[in-house]
Image: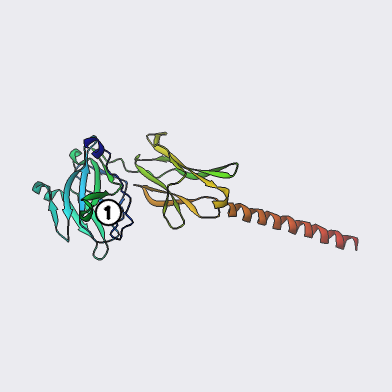
Amino acid sequence: QAGSMLLLPVLLAASSWSHAQAVPVQHPAMRTSAEGGSASMACRLTKEDTVHWYKQLPGEPPKRILYVSGKKPTFDDGTDEKKYQVRKHASEPHYSLTIDYVTQRDAGTYYCAIIRLWDAGVKIFGSGTKLIVSGKYKGNSKPENSEILQTKHKDQLLYVCLIENFYPEVIRVQWVDGADKEVTKNVVKGDVWKSTNDKYSVSTWLTLPVNMTNKNYFCKYDHESQENFKLPIQGIYCFFIIYLFSFYILLCLFLSFFFFLLFEYN
């Protein structure tokens, strides 16, 4: 059981039952803070609920810091009251956690979670926000290059989303459709690698049948320097439009040449 806890957060699929709850949405994926500063992170739910905040250190299970039911937080350790601040949006189920007077001990990954009390206390965790604490803040660098490469093999199209030279290394990359819903089928996610000048790069692949390329798909990434950035793929309709445009240009040239000869000989 201890080993399975180290694999948290397990993003539990929502039940088809009417009381099902969606996975909490957290952002950013990573936050960097210098010692003595503060760091904030957000958690968005689909409806009002009691929110639990956890902290996880490498190699250890998550440990709850506090929970919020209503407006006032309840701390597991009373000495944390001056360390953490929690806020809730006035009208939306959006919550934030702020860590003050940051030290190296605050480094770790922070998760918000909800608990299904009616389902044996099952916990549903968000994807987490990793906090990196540095003696001197190095800032961040947005990707120097981001593009989608394409190749065709038989009746399938392979799209490669390449994001290069960003800092720091934590980035969340997804394939989404036109409704901003994550696409997980036929997706391969690569690991982040160190490229040049202490910067990082990452790539991910999406394979689609040719007959599905008339739909809109995007490579979406969230990084400390740039959140919710989308790259569209070049669908088959795009190539069809280019083909029609090229045909139109050739037709115009042909007609121009035809009328030129007609007037020339008359």
Instruction: List x then y, in percent, for residue 205.
Output: 47, 42
Circle 1 crowding by C-alpha within 10 Å: few under 14, some 14–19, many from 20: many
Residue 92 to residue 109: above or below? below
Residue 155 sits in which quadrant? top right
Q: Secondary structure at mark 1?
A: strand
Residue 61 sits in which quadrant? top left
Look at the image and name its color scheme.
Answer: rainbow
Instruction: List x then y, in percent, for residue 92.
Output: 27, 63
Circle 1: residue type: Cys
The structure residue drawn at horizontal position 40% and vertical position 34%, both measured from the top left corner, is: 193
The one nearer the camera, 111 or 21, is 21
Q: Quadrant of the C terminus?
A: bottom right
Q: Is residue 248 left or right of residue 153?
A: right
Farthest right residue in view: 266
Q: Is residue 22 left or right of residue 214?
A: left
Does any portion of residue 163 appear in the rendered image? Answer: no
The structure residue drawn at horizontal position 28% and vertical position 46%, both measured from the top left corner, is: 129
Q: Quadrant of the N terminus?
A: top left
Total number of numbered labels?
A: 1
The structure residue drawn at horizontal position 70% and vertical position 58%, both measured from the top left corner, is: 248
Instruction: List x then y, in percent, for residue 111.
Output: 25, 47
Q: Which residue is mark 1?
A: 43
Does any portion of residue 66 appear in the rendered image? Answer: yes
